[in-house]
Amino acid sequence: MKEYDIRPQQGLIHRGNWRMLKQCMKKARAGEKVTVGFLGGSITQGSLSSTPQTCYAYLVYEWWKRRFPAAEIVYVNGGIGGTTSQFGVSRVREHMLCHRPDFLLIEFAVNDDNTPFFEETYEGLIRTVLGQDEAPAVLLMNNVRYDNGENAEEMHLKAAEAYALPMVSMKPVIWPKVSSGEIVRAEITPDGLHPNDAGHRLVASVVTACLDRIYEEMDREEEPAFADGSLPAPVTANAYEHSVRYQNHNTEPLLAGFRADRAPSENILDIFTGGYTASRAGDKITFRVTGTGIAVQYRKSVNKPAPVAKAVIDGDEAGAVILDANFDEDWGDCLYIETVLYHGENREHLVEITITEAHEDDAVPFYLVSVIGSC
């Protein structure tokens, strides 16, 4: 196993407040049950690690087990490939908070763009997590693209600072070694983005270096981040803190050609379940969604041709948004989110989705996974 000369402790780019993390570690030290959760995209899911046990999330979970052998440490991996914090905030209750994590690592830095839009969705996710009655101890983590050094760190760091959360990053630790050639990129990532086993070990080492520092200071008292226990005022328009994902189990849209997919879902990686399908031009589905923001989540498929649809909000045909189910990549079908209403009025909106183009030789039907309402 090759060793790489990095300084993982340099990955802590924002200290934040460690009180919650220290309390979580004290709970584990006392031998209590501690649930450690990981929420993010494909790297968190473990893409390109050879086994689920060699991805960074599992390696960090093993750190908890080594440090606290008397505790029952429960592992929950909430990574779903190709997804952003916009989807994350809509699913965090269903996929993560239902497990009541004591520790939660959040990572969307290479799926989110470095834009104000994702600053806002990321803040909404953080506020949703911290707003729970029994909020977990949160550690924010940023991966980086190893082909160009890009990530959403600039925008995400604003939330870390606003909510006094610790944040670690691969950008100041691993990326300089790759860009200088000291680490051969292909040795740690086959595609310039997703780590292999060696890359996942490096990522885990940056995370655990931060946890080691907190562990060493566990008994040093620290005041709460916010004296009155309430969250500070948001730093963005905060139109995503309250997001609801509508699927066929929690809503009843008007169907005119679309059909509900009742196939059971085995786990959160069964991403094309719980939605609606249609295959003929003119097929239509209508939702009533309350909020200031609306997004349509659908399948873009590598199997072509596929149908094309349009989304119309409140009858505004001139502002119709095209939903093209044909995917131009080759790595597999994509769980795609299209924002169709952004910072609108906070009221009930009519959402009409209609198939506008279908073909006799369509390889797959149009699959509408969900409609997401936010405010």
Image (cartoon, rainbow, N blue to C red):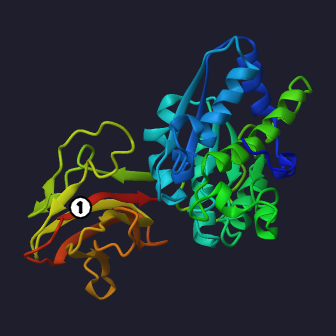
Q: Is residue 254 left or right of residue 219?
A: left
List x then y, in percent, for residue 148.
Answer: 68, 73
Relative to 281, 351 lies left or right: right
The spot of residue 7 in percent (x, y) is 87, 49
Nearest the eye: 228 or 126: 126
Q: Residue furthest front?
A: 1
Q: Position of residue 373 (x, y in %)?
A: 39, 59
The picture quadrant where one finds residue 249 is top left
Of residues 8 and 105, the one drawn nearer to the viewer in this rendering: 8
**In the visual, does 348 lie left or right of 99?**
left
Say which of 22 and 314 sits in front. 22
Say above or below: 186 vs 64.
below
Label 1: element kind: strand
Residue behind mark 1: 367
Residue found 25% across the figure and 79% down from its top: 315
From the viewer's perspective, is residue 149 above or below residue 139?
Answer: below
Near mark 1 (Cα within 10 A), the count class, few <14, some 14-19 or many ≥20, is: many
Q: Is residue 130 visible?
A: no
Q: Where, quadrant-wise, is the N terminus in this rendering?
A: top right
Residue at x-position 51% and y-position 50%: 47
- Image location of residue 142, percent across then percent down: 69, 55
Q: Residue furthest toward the bottom?
A: 318
Can residue 104 be seen in this snapshot? yes
What's the residue at 60%, 50% (across, down)?
A: 196
Judge whether 263 appears above or below 345 on screen. Answer: above
Residue type highlighted by circle 1: Tyr
